[in-house]
Image (cartoon, rainbow, N blue to C red):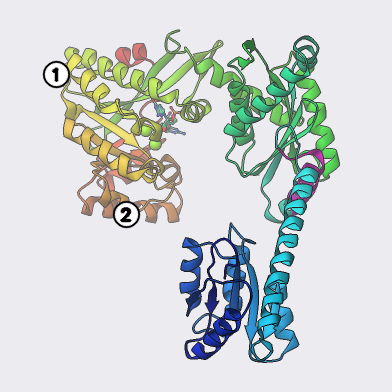
Amino acid sequence: LSIRRQRQMCIRDRDDDGIDRENIKRTLGHSTTPFNFTETESVDEALSALSVNNFDIILLDYRMPKRDGIELLLELRNSENDLNVAVIMLSNSEETELALECVRAGAQDFLLKSEVSTSRLQRAIVQAQTRFELEKQLHISYQQAKKLAEHDTLTGLYNRYSFEEALQLNILQKARDNSKLALTLFDLDNFKFINDNYGHHIGDQILIQVSQRISDCLRGNEVFARLGGDEFAIILTNLHTVDNATRVTTRILNSLEAPFNISGAKIHMTASIGIAVYPDSTLNANELLKHADIAMYRSKKLGRNQICYFESEMQEQFLQRYQIETNLIGAIARNEFTLHYQPIVNTSGSNVVGFEALIRWNFQDQLLYPDSFISIAENSRAIVDIGRWVIEQAIYQLSVWNLRTTTKYTIAINLSSVQLTDKCLVQCIADALSKYHINPALIEFELTETTLLENSKQTIKTLASIKDLGCRIALDDFGSGFSSVSHLQNFPIDTVKIDKSLIMASDEEKSRSLITGLSAMLHSLSLNIVAEGIENAEVVQFCQQLNIQRAQGYYYAKPLPVDDIEKNYF
Ligand code: C2E
Ligand code: MG
Ligand code: MG
C-alpha cells in the first residue's frame, strides 16, 4: 500500500478471503488519505509484485495458501534489500504468541481483522511506517558501528581486534581437524622513510594499494588484517604442507615488485614476512603471534624483502625449495640439465630394445635427481620449458644412436601433467620428430594416472593429438596409486609400466598374486607391459613366466649418462 509516492496497496490474502480484502479496501476508502492497492493471492505472487514495484506498506494475511504470511516476512527480511517495506500482519485468531512471532520475524504491527476500522488502520499504517524508518536507521548505525569495531578504516581490512578473535576461533577449530594453520605477519620495509619524505597522505595511499595487491594474491576466504601502522597479517588455514604458505607469501612478495604509482611519484615498496605454523610452533594463539613476530624480525635482520619461518625445520625446507625454484630459472640456458638413459630390455632374450630418458640437474656441484626438483618445477610451470628441452634432447639423442645401429631403439620420455596443458606441446613434439627424421612410433610418452585425473578433457585431447602424430603412450607407475581399469579404457594407452614398488616386493606372496592378476588383465586388454625396478634374476624369471615382454631395472642397468650408454651398448 502506498500512501504518497506510489499510491499502491498490496494486500495478500487467502483465496477465499476476498471479503476481508474488500472490507479493508472499503475501510481505507473512507480515510482522508487516498490509497493505491495491489492485491496478490499467494506469497510468490507477492514476491514478484515486490520485485517490480515499490510499496509503502504491506498488509499481510497470516494465513495464506501454500506458504504462509510469516514465510514471506522472513524471506523479505533476510533478502539483500531487506528492511525496505513496513509490514502489518492481519489475522483472525487472537493468539498473542502469533502476534509476537510476527513482530519477531520483522513485522511492524499486528492487527486482528475484527478490530479493523478506518481510524485504527490509518493509525497503524502511519505508526508502522515510522517504526520501520526508526528500525532502518538503527540497523544502519549498528552495521556502521560493527564495521568500525571490526575493520580498519583506511584499508577496509580486519583490524587487530577482529584478527585476534579470528585467530583464537581458527585455532579452536584446528584442534579438531588436524590440518595446519600458518600465521603470516608482514611489515613494509622502510615505510617510515616514505611517511617522512612524501608525507602521510602518500603513506596512506601506499597502505591502501599494498592491501589491494595482497588481496589479489589471496583466494578471498582468508582472514587478512591490518594490525596497525605498516603491519599486516594473514591467517592461512587448511594447509597440508607448509609449501602452500610459501607459495602464497612468495606470490605476495612478487606482487609488490612493480613500483607504486602515487600522485605521479613512483615508489618502490618491499615487505618482510614472518610465518609461524600451528600446531608445529605452539598450540597457543598469543605465542603463535609472538613466534610470527620473531620470524618477521629475522626477515628484517637478514636484509628485508624476504620470508622467514619461525620453525627451523620449516625454514630449511623453505630455503631449499626457494633455492631450487629460483635456480630453475635460467637452468636450461646455463646448460645445467642432462639426460641419463636407462636401458629397457626384452625379457625373453635380454637384448636392449630402447631407453628411458631420465632428467638430472647439475646444481651447485651436485647431481640432483628429478624427485627433488620436478614437483617444484611443476608448481612454477618451469616444467613446460624443461619438458620441451627433454623432448628435443631425447629425440636428438635417439637420432644419433639410430644412425649407428641397424636395431631401431625406442625412447621413453616422461611427461608431467602441467606439460599437457601446454598448448605448444604437440607442435614441439612434431617439430623435433621432423627435425631429426625420427619415426614417431619409436617414441613412447610416459604419464602417470594422477596426470590422467587432472583436467581430463584437455588431457584426452592432447593425448589424442600425440597419438595422431604416431607416437605411443605408456601409463607409468601402474599399481602404485589408483590403478583404475577405466583409465585403461578411456585413454589411448599402448603400454602399462608396472610400478617398481610392486615389482620389488614380488618376493612376497601377496605381491606375486597381484602382479599375476594384473598382467593377466593387461594381456586380456592387449596392452604391452613393462616391469620396472627389476633388481635380481628371480624377478626376471617371474616376468618371463607371466609373459611380461619388457623390463627395466638395476639388475640390467642403472640410468646412465650418454657416454656410458655408448660405451656399453654401441
Ligand atoms: P619413473 O618414470 O617411474 O622412472 C623410474 C625411476 O625408477 C627412475 O628414477 C629410475 O632411476 C628408478 N629405477 C629404475 N630402475 C630401478 C631399480 O631397479 N630399483 C630402484 N630402486 N629404482 C629404479 P629417477 O630417475 O629418480 O626418476 C624419478 C621420476 O622422476 C621418474 O619416475 C619420473 O616420473 C620423473 N622424471 C624423470 N625424468 C623426467 C622428465 O624428464 N620429465 C618429467 N616430467 N619427469 C621425469
Ligand atoms: Mg617413467
Ligand atoms: Mg615409473
Q: Is residue 79 above or below residue 391?
A: below
Please state which amino acid type lies under the numbered disc 2. Val
- 186 displayed left or right of 560: right
Q: Indicate the quadrant where residue 423 lies.
A: top left
Q: In terms of secondary structure, where does tag 1 sit?
A: loop
Q: Quadrant of the N terminus?
A: bottom right
Depicted 336 relative to depicted 460: above or below = above
Percent coordinates x, y for residue 506 in the rendering: 42, 47
Q: Where on the image, by quarter, is ligand 1?
A: top left
Count of all numbered marks drawn on residues in the image: 2
Report the residue at 64% width, 29% height from top: 249
Q: Main secondary structure of the magenta part?
A: helix
Please tell me whether mark 2 sits on a helix, a strand or a loop. Answer: helix
Q: Write the start and end of the magenta stretch as one range.
A: 157-172
Q: Kindly identify the residue that appears in the image at 64 percent across and 72 percent down.
A: 87
Pointer 2 residue: 485
Work out whether residue 403 or residue 30 is closer to the camera in this orientation and state it.
Answer: 30
- What is the number of the mark on residue 406? 1
Which residue is drawn at the image coordinates 49% and 15% (left, top)?
329
Residue 223 image offset from top left, x and y in percent: 69, 42
Please state the horizontal and vertical placement of residue 305, each as a whole percent of the image.
69, 17
